[in-house]
Image (cartoon, grey):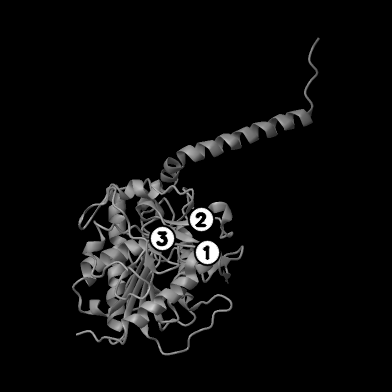
Amino acid sequence: MAKPPRSCATKFLYFVFFCIILVIAGAFAYRFFEKQLMRWALVPGTEYRDVPLPQGANYGQAALWIARPDIASNPALWLPTGVQRNNAAPRAAIFFVHPTSFTESNAWNAPLDHGESRNLAELFVRSQASAFNGLGQVWAPRYRQATFGAFLTNNDDARQALELAYRDVVAAYEEFIRQAPAGQPIILAAHSQGSMHLMRLLQERIRNAPEASRIAAVYLVGWPVSLSADLPALPLPACENAEQARCVVSWMSYAEPADPSQILDVWDETSGPRGPRRGTDMLCTNPLTGTRNGTSGADRNLGTLIPNEQMTEATLRPNTVSARCGPRGILLIGERDGLPEMGNYALPGNNYHVYDYALFWANLRADAERRLTAFGPAVATP
């Protein structure tokens, strides 16, 4: 007996079932091959090409900055609801280098007029550099940042892209030093790619510079700082306690179960000024206590920035995120299921890299205040 023809409804159900199988298979494929997929999607397949600055542009011009004192209503002045603005005279000059906001795979560096990366960089300055605006005026440059994919490979194109970005950071810092009040203490801060460039700036440009004596604190957040290969080449030691000035703070945030191999696999293939980084421990400052290493419950968290759905505003919510320094110096922030909803930007391995500042915004603000107070009066550059 011949089988009756399948109805349209039956065919549709078979099609839906087939799609479900594909989705499940895709999820398993991503789980096991996410590193390779990220490299394939984000590492540029083109050769490195220099991205020129606009004709006649230089860091003496406000157009090359996201934030500086003569830019009214700049993103670094933002405050979450309920935080009072400090109208006292500026006590410090803050130089902040924003993280990667360029993710295109058709170029190794971002043109300064790239709209999407400009907007995202401004969002980062608002949510990160704003933590320091109670202490003084923030300077945050635009720069021809390397694309995200440059951090997933060690090839020559990636190295050239990072070198171009670093040259911009150096030029911006030189202008900052020329214009910032000579008698003010300095706070240096950055995130991710910005922290990588700032660490190199400290090692190569600032280490023996006259203004080095004015640095009250350094925040190298979201970038691994090897205790043996990197830290000894910096002009300042690690911060051991919350009341210490003239020292370095650093952490990298992961929810549990944490898998930092996406970062460490590449990092372990590199060397710092004092030797290979492979297998070395990283500097981990607990942002809830201001001390090196250690464990703290969420009750010490003064406020996490919780964004709205549009990522246009955020409110402070205290007592939400814990912190403990784990193996190799990774900052562990508790089980992912127990964390507040921060948005859709957690990276593979439960990497909360994008939220390194937001998770501890209020504690970071208090930390910088303590360290600046401990630093004391301004010291004029000789």
| Secondary structure category for the residue under label 1 | helix
When the figure is inspected, residue 148 is found, relative to residue 203, above or below; the finding is above
Q: Mark 3 points at which residue?
A: 100
Q: What residue type is labelled 3?
A: Thr
Task: Say the numbered circle drawn on residue 334.
Answer: 2
Residue 380 x, y percent position in the rendering: 25, 87
Residue density around tag 2, few if under 14, some if 14–19, many if 20 or more, within 10 Å: many
| Secondary structure category for the residue under label 3 | loop
| Secondary structure category for the residue under label 2 | strand
Q: Which residue is drawn at 50% across and 63% down?
A: 297
Q: Quadrant of residue 110?
A: bottom left
Q: Name the residue under label 1.
A: 298
Pointer 2 and pointer 3: residues touching (CB < 8 Å)?
A: no
Disc 2 from disc 3: Cα separation: 25 Å
The numbered mark, 2 or 3, whose residue comes first in the sequence reads 3
When the figure is inspected, residue 195 is found, relative to residue 27, above or below; the finding is below
Q: What residue type is labelled 2?
A: Gly
Mark nearest the camera among 2 and 3 is 2
Residue reaching furthest top? 1
Pointer 2 and pointer 1: residues touching (CB < 8 Å)?
A: yes
Q: Which quarter of the figure is the N terminus placed in?
A: top right
Disc 1 from disc 3: Cα separation: 29 Å
